Amino acid sequence: KICESSGESLVSCEGECCSVFHVECLGLKSVPEEKFICAECRNGEHTCFSCKLPGKDVKRCSVSTCGKFYHEACVRKFATALFESRGFRCPQHCCTACSVDKDIHKASKGRMVRCFRCPIAYHSGDGCIAAGSLFVSSHILICSNHSKRNHSSSAVNVGFCFVCARGGKLLCCESCPASFHPECLNIEMPEGCWNCNDCKAGKKLRYKQIVWVKLGNYRQVHWWWPAEICNPRSVPLNIQGLKHDIGDFPVFFFGSHDYYWVHQGRVFPYVEGDKSFAEGQTSINKTFKKALEEAAKRFQELKAQRESKEALEIERNSRKPPPYKHIKSNKVIGKVQIQVADLSEIPRCNCKPSDENPCGLESECLNRMLQYECHPQVCPAGERCQNQCFTKRLYPDAEIIKTDRRGWGLRTKRSIKKGEFVNEYVGELIDEEECRLRIKRAHENSVTNFYMLTVTKDRIIDAGPKGNYSRFMNHSCNPNCETQKWTVNGDIRVGLFALCDIPAGMELTFNYNLDCLGNGRTECHCGAENCSGFLGVRPKTAFATANEEKVKNAKLKQKKRKIKTEQKQMHEDNCFQCGDGGELVMCDKKDCPKAYHLLCLNLTQPPFGKWECPWHQCDVCSNPAVSFCEFCPRSFCKDHEKGALVASALDGRLCCSAHD
C-alpha cells in the first residue's frame, strides 16, 4: 500500500482494510509474530479510496474481502456502485467498460482486474481493459487515468466536426482529438477547458481497435494514419523497450507496418466508411492507399469476430433467463421497514379444528374474507389451519418457459382452483425516492424491463435484481391471476391468486395495471380477444364491445335528436391523504380524480349531495385554490400561493413544505 511494488517480507493487516505492507515500509525489522493491525484500523480513520481524504465518516464496501472505504457522496458519483440493504458494493466489483457500453448484466459478472489507485475495474482480457493501463500483477493494474503526461497540452484535435464532418469554428476536446461545432451539440461555446461526452463518461480506447493516429508530420504530410492498437505483450521486444509511460500504448501502422507508442490525445476511433472519406483527399500516395485498404479489411475482420462472439453469447443467454438472485421473502432497502404485529393485535377467526377444511378456500373464515392471514399461535384451528399460504410458501409447482413474443413466462405444472394462492410477489422493498433513482439509472443504461409493484404510497417491491418465480409472470388483458394485498403478521404483502380454474400446462398471467412514465407506451402482445394494444391502457370489455355495436347500428337509423351522454369519471384507487386503498369517498368536482378515507377527512359518514374535496379550497382562507401540491391535499389561493409551493426533485412536480 505504501510503495506500490511487490516483493517478499509482506505482512497483511488483520483489521478491516485488508491492506498489505512491506516490513521495511512499516519501519519494522521482521514480520511481527503477533496479530498485525495497521494505524488506520487502530484509530478508525480510514482514507476514502476515491478522494483520498481520511475521516471517520467513511463507509466500508460490503464485500468482505474488499476493504475499500468511501464517503457516501464519493461512491454515489460512480454508476458502477451497487447499493444494497446492508450497504454498498463499491465500483471495483463492476466492469467500467461494460457499464459504459450499457451491458449491466455482464458488468458485475466474471473475473475482474482492479486499479490499485482508484475505483476502476475491468474484466480480464483485451476486450474490456483500457489501452495504456499498466499491469502490476495478474489481477492488479494501474489504469490509464494515472498518466503523468498532461494530455491536454499534447492533444492534437481534428480540423472537422465529428457530427457534420465540416470545418469552421470548432469546440475541441481537451482529452482526445474530437472536435465539434457548438451548434451541432446544441450548446453555447463554453469558456475554459471542455471535454466531450465520451471522455466525461470514461469511455476509453481498447486493444485490437482500429484508430486514426497523428504523429506530428508523419511521412512529411499532415495526414492522420490508420493503425491498430496492440497489447504491449504482443509487440516486438525492441518496441516494448522504447520509452513510454502509463497511458501510452503501442500502435501498428497499416501500410508501412511500423510500431510506435502514442496516447489518447493523438488517437480517435476508425468507423465504417472512413476509407471512402480518406480516399477523397488530394495527393494520396501509394503507401497511404495501401494503409486504407488494410485498415478497412482488418476492421471488417474484427467486426465479424465481434458479431460472431455476440451471436454466440445471445444464443447462450437465450437458453436461460437473465441473471437475478432468487429470494424467498422481501429484502428491505434503505429506510423502509417491515411491520411486525404483537400477537394481541392479530385478529382471531371463528374456525374450529373439527371443521372439514378449517380456514380453507370454501370456508367462512373471517380472516380470509378480510384478507388477513391466520397466525399459528392465534388461530383456533391450530395446525389444521389452511390460511397460512404466505408464511408456509404453499405455491403450486410451476416452471419458467420461453414465450414467442413476450420473453420469459411462468407455466403451472398442476391444475389450480379458482381463488387458490399461486405465489407471493417478492423482491427488494424500496421507497419512492429509491424507485425514482432506479428508474432514472435504468433509462440511462437503456434498460426496458421493469419489475416494480407498488404496495403502498412509499413501499414498492422491485423484483428486478432479486425475486422469485412470480417475477416471470407476463401481463395479459384477460389474465388468469390477480394481485391481492394481504396482511401477514402485521405487514402488508402482495399475493397472486387464481381468477379462474387454471389447467396444468397453462401460462400464468396477471394485469400489470402499468403506470406509464412520460409519453412512452409499451406494446402489448398478450393475444387476448380484448387486448387494448398497449400496457397501461384499459382492456376492452364485452359490455364496451356490445355498446360499440349498438352505436354502429344506431348511426344507420335516422335520429330525431342527439342525446349527449356524460362519460363516467375515473377516480384513483388510493387515498390522496395517506396513500392506502380501501373504502373511499370520491370528489364530485369535474376532472378531479382524488379519493379519501372518511377517517382522513375527519368525517364519520359520507358527505351528502355533490361534494368537493379539500384540495380545491385554500388551506389558509378556504377560498377557491389555484395552486395545488401534487403529493397531498394542500392548496392555495391567489393571495396565499406565493412561496407556498416549490418544484420537487421528482420530475419537477409542485410540492408544499411538508415534502422534502
Image (cartoon, rainbow, N blue to C red):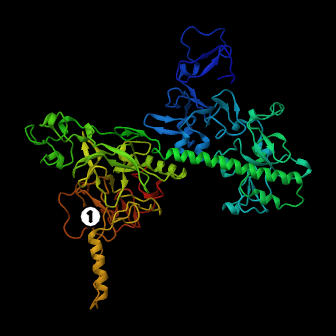
Residue 309 placed where, x, y %? 60, 45
Q: In the rendered picture of this protein, how many numbered marks are placed on residues?
A: 1
Question: Label 1 is placed on what type of residue?
Answer: Met
Q: Could you tell whether 549 is left or right of 185 in the image?
A: left
Q: Residue at x 40, y 38 (%)?
A: 326
Q: Quadrant of residue 257?
A: top right
Q: Is residue 14 above or below residue 422?
A: above
Using the image as rendered, state which of residue 497 and residue 391 is in the foreground: 497
Using the image as rendered, state which of residue 118 and residue 55 is in the foreground: 118
Residue 148 placed where, x, y %? 76, 35
- For the N terminus, the quadrant is top right
Q: Quadrant of residue 147?
A: top right
As helix, strand or loop, the secondary structure at mark 1 comes to strand
Task: Work out which residue is located at the far right of the displayed protein and give it.
Answer: 220
For the question of whether residue 422 can be seen, the reply is: yes
Q: Could you tell whether 100 is left or right of 625 in the image?
A: right
Q: Could you tell whether 421 is left or right of 469 in the image?
A: left
Q: Is residue 245 above or below residue 33?
A: below
Q: Could you tell whether 360 is left or right of 573 in the image?
A: left
Residue 19 placed where, x, y %? 59, 22
Q: Is residue 579 above or below residue 351?
A: below
Residue to which mark 1 is pinned: 586
Q: Residue at x 26, y 38 (%)?
A: 391
Q: Residue at x 17, y 36 (%)?
A: 344
Using the image as rendered, state which of residue 428 and residue 78 is in the foreground: 428
Residue 106 placed where, x, y %? 54, 42
For the question of whether residue 174 can be seen, the reply is: no
